[in-house]
Image (cartoon, grey):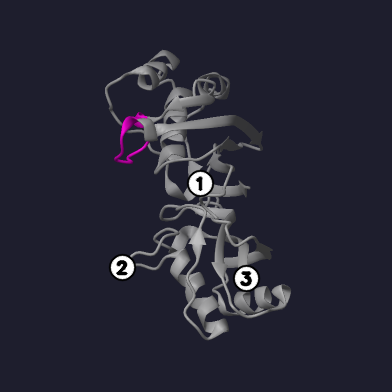
Amino acid sequence: MRLLAVCEYDGTSYAGWQYQPNEISVQETIENAISRIRNTETHIFGSGRTDAEVHALGQTFHFDIAEERDLEKFRYSINCVLPKDIRIKSLRVVPDDFHARLSAKQKTYEYRITLKEESAFDYKYEEHVDLPLDIEEMKKCSKIFVGEHCFKNFTTKEEDQNNFVRTIYEIKFILENKHLRIQFTGNGFMRYMVRFLVGTLIQVGKGKLTISEVRKLMETTTRKVVSYKAEGKGLFLVEVKY
C-alpha cells in the first residue's frame, strides 16, 4: 500500500529536507520515526528538497507499507515519536504508480519579511529589512518572472540550458502590520530559486536595482547567477498540488 503524507516542520534545527551525512535532516528524522513504529526500515520520498532553516506548512512525501493500518492511528503514533517541530498532518492511500515528486503539478512557496523591529518570537521565521521598501516597484518587477522563462541566473543548479526553464503562474504580495508575505506559485522551483528571486525583489524595493537591470538578467544569454539571496529562515513551502 502506497501512502501520501502531508507534513509541516520548523526547519530551524535541520540541515534541510534531504538526508545528509553527519547532519540532521527532516527526511531522516521522519524515516526513523516511521521505521520505529513499523519495526522495519522504511524509506520516504519527498516532493522536493528544502534548504537548511527553510520551513514547510505542506511538504509531501510518499512511502510503501505491506501491512493494513488504521491511518489516523498510524499518523497519531508517528507524531508521538517525532520531535515537536515536525508534524504529520494527514495520510492517505494513493495509486501504486504515484510519486510525490514526479506526480506534482504545482507548488506554492511563501517568503516572509518583517519591515519593523525584530520580535523575540518571529526572528526565526522572517527576514528583517530595516530600510523602507517600495513594494509597488517590487510588484511591477515581479511581473517579469511570471510565465515560462529560463531562470538560469536565479539558481545554482548545474545543468543544461533547457533544464533551467520553469513556469511561474502567480506572484502575490500580502502586507499586514508591516509584515510582508510574497507567495510564488509555479510548476517547480530549482535550488535557491525563490530565495534569489526574493533577494532581487528586495534590492529593487530598496532602490539599489532597477527593473530594467532585472529584465537584462532574465534575457541575457550569458549565465551570471545573481548575488542577492534572501535568508533561508523566511521561506515556507506552503502547498504541493497533484
Identify the amino acid type marked 1. Answer: Leu
Q: Residue at x 47, y 50 (%)?
A: 233
Q: Residue at x 28, y 27 (%)?
A: 223
Identify the amino acid type marked 2. Answer: Pro
Q: Secondary structure at mark 2?
A: loop
Other-residue count near label 2 (Cα within 10 Å), few / some / many at <14 / 14–19 / ≥20: few
> Mark 1 highlights which residue?
235
Image height of 143 relative to 81, above or below: above
Do callouts 2 and 3 mark residues in contact (Cβ within 8 Å)?
no
Q: Secondary structure at mark 3?
A: loop
Q: Is residue 212 visible?
A: yes
Q: Which mark is residue 1?
A: 3
**Residue 236: x and y, percent?**
54, 48
Question: Which residue is at the front of the view, 189 or 159?
Answer: 159
Marks 1/2: CA distance?
Answer: 24 Å
Q: Which residues are magenta?
A: 152-161
Question: Which residue is at the front of the view, 173 or 42?
Answer: 42
Q: Is residue 155 magenta?
A: yes
Q: Secondary structure at mark 1?
A: strand
Q: Is residue 84 left or right of residue 162?
A: right
Identify the amino acid type marked 3. Answer: Met
> Mark 2 highlights which residue?
21
Marks 2/3: CA distance?
Answer: 29 Å
**Residue 122: x and y, percent?**
56, 52
Q: Work out whether mark 1 precedes mark 3 in sequence or the reverse, and give the earlier one.
A: 3
